[in-house]
Each structure stands twice: as C-alpha cells, then as structure tokens.
Image: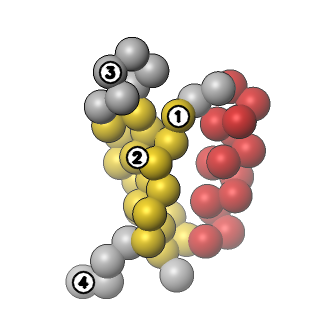
Amino acid sequence: MRFEILRLDDASGVATDRLIVDAETVGQYVKDAAATGERLYIRPCKTV
C-alpha cells in the first residue's frame, strides 16, 4: 500500500512538501518527524 505524506509548515500548517511512499517507509518518516518535532499529515494514496 502507498501513502501520501505532506510536510506541514510549523507556523501556518500549510503543506510545504509532498511525498508518495510505501508502508515500510512511512514508519521511518514518522520516527524522524517525532525526533525533530516536524508536523506530518499522512493519508492513503489513491491508486491511479
């Protein structure tokens, strides 16, 4: 399964970056974001 990860701006909450990754990679992004305090919005990616 693939997921869309949006990195959110700390001040405004606006998405600044968009990534499409597999389920295994999501875990690494979550760990990294938790360590740095980065805000992420993660949702399942629609199949094209």
Q: Tag 1, which secondary structure?
A: strand
Residue occupying the point 61% across, 59% down: 26
Q: Is residue 16 visible?
A: no
The reply to whether callout 2 and callout 4 are in contact (CB within 8 Å) is no
* First along the sequence among labels 1 and 2: 2
Q: Position of residue 41 (x, y in %)?
A: 46, 48
Residue occupying the point 65% across, 26% down: 37
Q: Tag 2, which secondary structure?
A: strand
Q: Residue furthest left?
A: 48
Give the numbered dot on residue 16: none
Nearer to us of marks 2 and 3 is 3
* First along the sequence among labels 1 and 4: 1
Q: Is residue 32 left or right of residue 16?
A: right
Distance from disc 1 to disc 4, alpha carbons, whole Å, reads: 27 Å
Q: Is residue 21 left or right of residue 48?
A: right
| 27 is higher (above) or lower (below) than 6 | below
Q: Identify the residue under disc 3.
A: 12
Nearer to us of marks 2 and 4 is 2
* Quadrant of res 12: top left
Q: Position of residue 4 (x, y in %)?
A: 41, 61
Give the numbered dot on residue 6: 2
* First along the sequence among labels 2 and 4: 2
Distance from disc 1 to disc 2, alpha carbons, whole Å, reads: 9 Å
Residue occupying the point 38% across, 72% down: 45
Q: Identify the residue under disc 1.
A: 39
* First along the sequence among labels 4 and 3: 3
Circle 2 Cα neighbour tier, 10 Å, few/some/many (<14 / 14–19 / ≥20)? some
The amino acid at mark 4 is Val
